[in-house]
Image: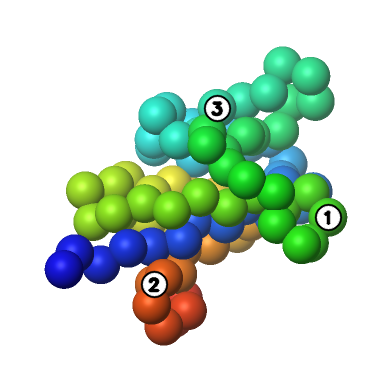
Amino acid sequence: MAEKYKVQLDRPGCIGAAACAAANSKRWVMSPQDGKVDLTEGKPMKQEGWLETEIDEAELATNIEAAKACPVAVIHILKKTTGEKIA
């Protein structure tokens, strides 16, 4: 069975640098309303303003690239089964 991952966005902490959108424009889209990034297919989390979605192995590399490109480290990627943070 292929590993699944959770991608989480601390949207309130986003500064709108757009590095994530440059790395992966499929998942990361800049909002014209406030200049911050939106996580496509992201669902609200318990933390105010945070979003989360699930991805599979096929999307992992580009989302890790997006997380590493973020200058304020508001993108988190975890293994779904263990919760281990990988980016």
| Residue 2 screen position, x and y as percent | 19, 64
| Residue 56 screen position, x and y as percent | 29, 54
Asked if residue 23 lies left or right of residue 70, the reply is left
Badge 3 vs badge 1, beta-carbon distance below 8 Å: no
Q: Which mark is residue 48?
A: 1
Q: Which mark is residue 29?
A: 3
Outermost residue, left direction? 1
Give how far apart the Cα atoms at labels 3 and 1 are. 20 Å
Q: Secondary structure at mark 3?
A: strand
Residue type, numbered disc 3: Val
Outermost residue, front direction? 1
In front: label 3 or label 1:
1
> Which quadrant holds residue 32?
top right
The residue at which mark 2 appears reads as 79
| Residue at x 39%, y 35% (from the top left corner) | 24
Judge by depth and name the residue closer to the eye, 6 or 21.
6
Q: Sequence order check: which comes first, mark 1 or mark 2?
A: 1
